[in-house]
Amino acid sequence: MSEPLVIAGKTLTSRLIMGTGGAANQQILREALVASGTAMTTVAMRRVDAGGHTGLLALLDDLGITVLPNTAGCRTADEAVLTARLAREALDTNWIKLEVIADDRTLLPDGVELLDAAEQLVDDGFVVLPYTNDDPVLCRQLEEAGCAAVMPLAAPIGTGLGIRNEHNLEMITAAAGVPVICDAGIGTASDAARAMELGCAAVLLATAVTRADDPVTMARAMKLAVESGHLARTAGRIPKRFWSQASSPTGSPV
């Protein structure tokens, strides 16, 4: 059996972290979460504050899934820090998925504000998991700031484009001393498997499942993809060769 994912001393039974945005209804979401086998799911604090996700929190509690609040929608470090503190008060957790977005068109992280917020939250006792650009330097700075993991994007949120820069992602996984979680841009199961093959410790996704034609089946596909990609990584792929190499004896059979 594959070893479990451990972040900041917490053991998770699945390397697939699910988001909840975009589901058609809670019944489909429930079935998809069960099919995914996820042990941790992100929830936007802005929606909880608005009272729209009380049913979602009850659903996650019923399924025994750990809630990871996030700061989605925040544009500045100060706003993200305030949202994280509200999450800690409301949900009694010091874990936070940190998001600080530069603009509404690209939804790409603002690296300067993100690093500022991460430093403040780590100093305030949070377990910080930052959603970040696929920038090896920024990921290193976030790790040095004390983040418990780094979460570089595969592609912009909701695009389904898959991994746009495999080299950067592999540089991040090769250098990181904390778990690397591929977050955003996953479109289908092969993208999730590839992220794991490149050395990611886990994959976080939402849209690829919630907006699929069959969310429940896609959730199961993502579960299997993450598992198989991780197994392939730990097994070790054969080296690529320019010329063919026979796997059976080439001499005469007689």
Image (spheres, grey):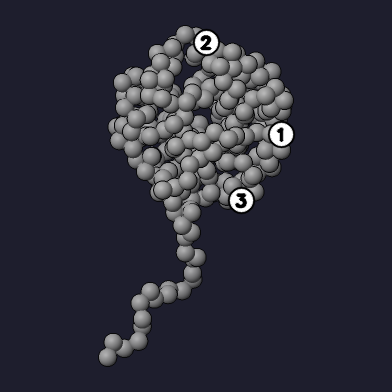
Across and down, in percent, residue 186 comes to: 45, 38
* Residue at (55, 23) in percent of width and height: 70
Question: At numbered mark 2, what does the secondary structure look like: helix, strand or loop?
Answer: helix
The label on residue 174 is 3
Q: Residues within 10 Å of mark 1 (few under 14, many from 20)?
A: some
| Amino acid type, mark 1 | Ala
Residue type, numbered disc 3 = Ala
Report how far apart the C-alphas of labels 2 and 1 lie in the structure: 28 Å
Of callouts 1 and 3, which one flags the residue occurring earlier in the amino acid sequence? Answer: 1
Mark 3, Cα crowd under 10 Å, few <14 / some 14-19 / many 20+, is some
Residue 113: give x, y in percent of width and height.
69, 26
Asked if 104 appears above or below 9 in the picture, the reply is above
In the drawing, what numbered circle is on residue 145?
Answer: 1
Mark identifier at residue 49: 2
Expressed as whole percent of the image width and height from the top left, the position of residue 31 reads 31, 27
Label placed on residue 17? none
Left or right of 68? Residue 134 is: right
Q: What residue appears at the point 61 percent right and 50 percent down from the top-left corner? A: 174
Whichever of callouts 2 and 1 sits on the residue coming sooner in the sequence is: 2
The residue furthest bottom is 254
Q: Residue furthest left?
A: 254
Going by the numbered disc 2, the residue's amino acid type is Asp
| Residue 16 point in image, percent of width and height | 45, 37
